Amino acid sequence: MTELGTPSFKKTVVELLYQLADDDFILACRGSEWLGLAPHIEEDVAFSSISQDTMGHAAMFYGLLEQLGEGNMDELSHAREGSQRKNAVLCEIPNGTGHYLKEPRYDWAFTVVRQFYYSIAKKIKLESLKQSAYEPLAHAAVKINMELHYHILHWTVWFKQLILSGGEAKQRMLEAIIRVEQEFGDVCSLGPLSAEMANLKLIDKEDVLLERFHNSVKPVFHTLSIPYKGSFGYRSGRGRFGEHTQELQHALTTLTEVYRTDPAAAW
């Protein structure tokens, strides 16, 4: 394992941790907005559990940042402005129009595809991170990876069932796949220090991770007899480089309300 001795090594570790933490933090927020709105009560419970797990993963990554002297983990998760966040833009996109407390016109197909794609990409990153040169991150990846296995099973079932249902369900899923892939380049990106991350053996190269993603997803598409394009874009911005939508700040305003009212509150 590489020692955390040089400023460049620490800077690169910090960049990677912010990406991992911010991705999980905002996606858990979007997942929590489905509480009481999921297709059935069993899914309400299951999705709430997945979102809780995901927020727990974010807490672990923020905890590592705190250990590196970046500040208190509660401040890192709740007090940073949207412009400081490193999450992929796909994670911040709303579930649909309206508000979860008033006339939410949410798109379950989009949510399923986003969670399916994201969970697989996260799994591939974690498998690489288990061999990371930064030992605390490698240990965290091992722990998180055990929970993620069940997340992938859950979203794979939804992904397959909705497409196999045919009719409107299949059509909406195909439209959601296009929409997610238009933003998915950001999820696959490791940002401005991607080369350094690979050179320092913190995580594998972007193209290696992307190829593993393709190899994981293609068989699922094949069994469903639908084409897999795998051509990913950055339609709404590049979150790893600080480019975000206004929706991120809106979400953070709601998510951090309790913290701003009482910074000592547990989350």
Image (cartoon, rainbow, N blue to C red):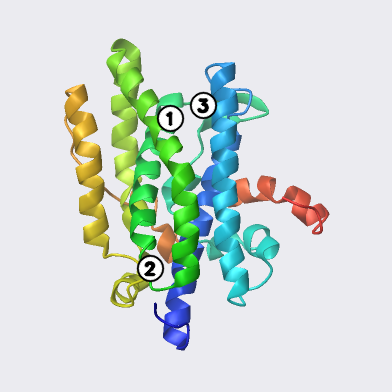
Question: At 83% from the left edge and 55% from the top edge, which residue is drawn?
Answer: 262
What percent of the width, then of the height, locates residue 138?
Answer: 44, 64
- State which quadrant residue 192 falls in: bottom left
Residue toward you, 106 or 222: 222
Query: Can residue 91 be seen in the rendering of this structure?
Result: yes
Give me the residue at 35% from left, 72% from top: 197
Q: Name the residue under label 2.
A: 132
Query: How busy is the neighbourhood of tag 1: few (under 14 within 10 Å), some, or many (20 plus)?
Result: some
Q: Is mark 2 on a helix, strand or loop?
A: loop
Q: Specify few, some or many for label 2: CA neighbours under 10 Å numbering under 14, 14-19, or 20 or more.
A: many
Q: Nearer the viewer, mark 3 or mark 2?
A: 2
Residue 15 appears at what percent x and percent y? 46, 70
Which of pointers 2 and 1 lies earlier in the amino acid sequence?
Answer: 2
Question: Which dot marks residue 15?
Answer: none
Q: How crowded is mark 3: few (under 14 residues within 10 Å), some or many (20 or more)?
A: some
The answer to whether one can see residue 231 in this image is no
Residue, disc 3: 106
| Residue drawn at 53 percent across, 30 percent down | 97
- The residue pinned by badge 1 equals 154
Q: What residue type is labelled 1?
A: His
Q: With 48 as the anchor, is 207 left or right in this view?
A: left
Kindly state the secondary structure of the residue where label 3 is placed: strand
